[in-house]
Amino acid sequence: MAIRTHQSISGFVASDPQLSYTERGDARLYMKVGIEHYRKEPDNTFTQLETTFHDLIAYRGAAEQGAERLAKGDNIIADGRVRDYSYERNGQRYEGEEFIATRIGHDLARTRYEVDRSERASARDATAFASPQQAAPSAATAIGL
């Protein structure tokens, strides 16, 4: 089975996270994320380029947890997808893109913290995962052509 991949971004929370709710009552988190860019030079040093800023949106559980645990300045990694949007206001057309995050967390390479491993209510048990068993090599002789 192939490994499922998604788009992701790595950056820092550039604005205070804002939690709101949709008309259906779902949690919605909005924040600006800064992404630093670098160029590798021929002498193997790096030159920092201009930082870019992007809109990040998360919904439901990711929004609630993000609002509770993230703060301006935190280094994060987010998994999700880029969505292009456009709208019209007062006769003016606006276009842009935003990152819709399905998962957000602190960047382990840039964040120090402690993990609380106390038991919590969960639909799945951490011990339920079992490594796939590989079949023993067959004793049958291979036939070549």
Image (cartoon, rainbow, N blue to C red):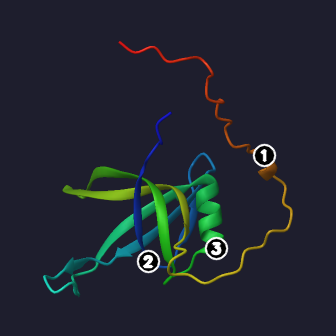
- Tell me the residue that label 2 is attached to: 12
The dot on residue 37 is none
- Tell whether 31 sits left or right of 112: left
- Tell me the residue that label 3 is attached to: 69
- Tell whether 78 sits left or right of 39: right
Q: Which residue is drawn at 41% across and 58% down?
A: 8
The Cα atoms of the two marked residues, 3 and 2, are separated by 14 Å
User: What amino acid does circle 3 point to?
Assistant: Arg
Instruction: For the residues labelled 1 and 2, say whether their Cβ atoms are less than 8 Å apart.
Output: no
The dot on residue 124 is 1
**Which of the image's four quarters has the C terminus?**
top left
User: What amino acid does circle 2 point to?
Assistant: Phe
The Cα atoms of the two marked residues, 3 and 1, are separated by 22 Å
User: What amino acid does circle 1 point to?
Assistant: Arg
* Mark 1 secondary-structure assignment: loop
Q: Position of residue 130 (x, y in %)?
A: 73, 43
* Mark 2 secondary-structure assignment: strand
The Cα atoms of the two marked residues, 1 and 2, are separated by 31 Å
Query: In the figure, 75 relative to 89: above or below?
Result: below
Q: Position of residue 22 (x, y in %)?
A: 56, 52
Dot 3 or dot 1: first in sequence order is 3
Please count the marks in the image.
3
Dot 3 or dot 2: first in sequence order is 2
Local packing at callout 2 (Cα closer than 10 Å; few below 14, some 14-19, many 20+) is many
Local packing at callout 1 (Cα closer than 10 Å; few below 14, some 14-19, many 20+) is few
Quarter of image, res 49: bottom left
* Mark 3 secondary-structure assignment: helix
Query: In the figure, 94 relative to 17: above or below?
Result: above
